[in-house]
Image (spheres, helix red, strand yellow):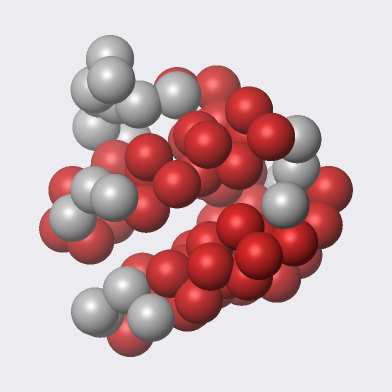
Amino acid sequence: MEEYRKRLLYKANYRGTKEADILFGGFAREYLHTLSKEELNSFEKILDESDDLLLKLILSGDTIPCHLDGQFLKKIMDFVNGQ
């Protein structure tokens, strides 16, 4: 499980755009060690999406696609908004 967390931490920190690196890397550093296996899987699915889509969802509040875990994405959005 620790290897899985390390892989997700890397994936969160090296997204492709600096903005996404900051948002997802910050969330991963803060919460990755507390996430359950299910939450880690949800996080990985989110990280598999494009930066453009994710930044649009998080920053403008667009409708979350049904194939993503909306409740988990809301956790990330709360982190980004400082709540």
**Residue 20 x %, y %:** 36, 70
Whether residue 21 is situated above or below residue 48 in the rendered picture: below
**Residue 23 x %, y %:** 48, 67
- Pick whichever, 1 or 83, lies toward us: 1
Whether residue 75 is situated above or below residue 8 in the rendered picture: above
Q: Quadrant of residue 18?
A: bottom left
**Residue 31 x %, y %:** 75, 56
Q: Residue at x 83, y 48 (%)?
A: 34
Q: Residue at x 23, y 61 (%)?
A: 51
- Pick whichever, 50 or 10, lies toward us: 10
> In this rendering, would 36 be left or right of 66?
right
Q: Residue at x 37, y 53 (%)?
A: 47
**Can see residue 27?**
no
Q: Residue at x 63, y 28 (%)?
A: 38
Q: Residue furthest top?
A: 66
> In this rendering, would 33 be left or right of 27?
right
**Figure label count:** 0
**Can see residue 45?**
yes
> In this rendering, would 11 be left or right of 15?
right
